Amino acid sequence: MLRISRKAESFTESVIREMNRLAVAAGAVSLAQGFPDFACPPELKAAAAEAVAADHNQYAITFGAKPLRDAIAAKTAHFHPGWTVDPDAQISVVNGATEGMIAAMLGLLDPGDEVIVFEPFYENYGPDAILTGAIPRYVTLHEPDWRIDPEELRAAVTPRTRAIVVNSPHNPTGKVFTREELDLVADLCREHDLIAFTDDIYQHLVYEGEHIPLATLPGMAERTVSIDSMSKTYSVTGWRVGWVIASPELTVGVRRVHDFLTVGAAAPLQHAAVAGLTMADAYYDALLAGYRERRDVLLPTLEAAGFRVHRPAGAYYAMTDIRDLTDEDDVAFARRLIADPGVATVPGSSFFSRPELGRTKLRFAFPKRLETLRAAADRLASLAPAARV
């Protein structure tokens, strides 16, 4: 009998992207999938058109066009003084942070290796480990501030543990990991010879606290695989241009997998990306101010509608609790919201290894125009008195 693989049977398609498809079909305001509904910087549009016109339309070097790798190295040093990266030996351009994570895991982990993942988590990390043949081990982030319990984290490390995934600012909670928490992770990595996969894609969206790259902590540069992308910082989620920064020794594995997994990212968009990475600091200041305003529009709306809201310190998501609104589970309630009042979210259970842990939660994304957020607010205004079933 024809069947799919056991690996593919062990997880579903993305719930996040499914909810966005349902929103489009229903004409709902979508606060589900995390992509902007506003334009990217005009400089990037112009640079993309110029790159195509200049015939940068054939394969770039597999691990990235030289001008882009140089720009990534320069930007890294600019925002994180003291973190010096060799663009020729340590930077690999990939098809978005999504490919960066799976290429890194495939290139650096073996079947049976264990990978520690904090939960709730971005839904790709578990399938990434499974596709690698590795075993995800989940450690809870405890509400209300999504803190790490040091003893729980230490207990999760076994002789088979090979790596840990750190996402800060964090999707879906908006948590920004503290220096104390990152020191704890670094201590365990050094003590047990672990690799740290860090998803730094929201590093420029920090409202409270600071983004501290794990690679900048003592002894961590050689064992950290830092993954980033153009997508969120420059509002070009469809470009699929990302990069992986790692030591030369680890970069070998990442590049070998990337070469056979996708060959390379889109050549003209690699050249165009340089225009984003070389923008003045004022761009990042304005980006953060815009997202802070969006956050401050959405959160009161959710609270007024009856949601318990976890105030995000970073990224562009708000994790909420629905138990004051309904007795339905997260999936049923999320689907009902799409139909009436017409707002799409993501069920919280998709961010947990055990779905029951997220049954009272929904995630809202706010990388949207203020008009979009206000339209959602208008629809949600009727929710509180009518929602409970």
Image (cartoon, rainbow, N blue to C red):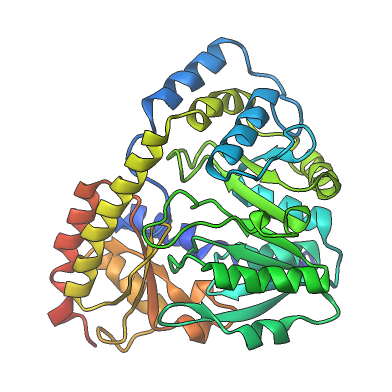
Q: Is residue 194 above or below residue 153?
A: above
Query: In the visual, does 314 lie left or right of 290?
Result: right
Q: Quadrant of residue 149?
A: bottom right
> Residue reaching furthest top?
54
Query: Is residue 362 left or right of 53 when viewed as pictured?
Result: left
What residue is shown at x 65% (from left), y 88% (from top)?
151
Tell me residue 201's x, y (percent): 53, 51
Residue 84 appears in the figure: yes
* Residue 8 horizontal/vertical position (percent): 71, 65
Q: Quarter of the image containing the N terminus?
A: bottom right
Locate residue 119: give its quadrant. bottom right
Frontmost residue, 280 versus 326: 280
354 left or right of 92 in image: left
Q: Residue 222: percent from the left, percent from the top?
A: 78, 53
* In the image, residue 389 above or below residue 8: below
Picture layout, residue 271 above or below residue 78: above
The answer to whether 313 is drawn above or below residue 327 in the figure is above
Q: Of 270 and 196, which appears nearest the observer?
A: 196
How many numbered marks have been drawn onto this rendered protein structure?
0
Residue at x 80%, y 38% (from the top left corner): 259
- Residue sitting nearer the eye, 338 or 199: 199
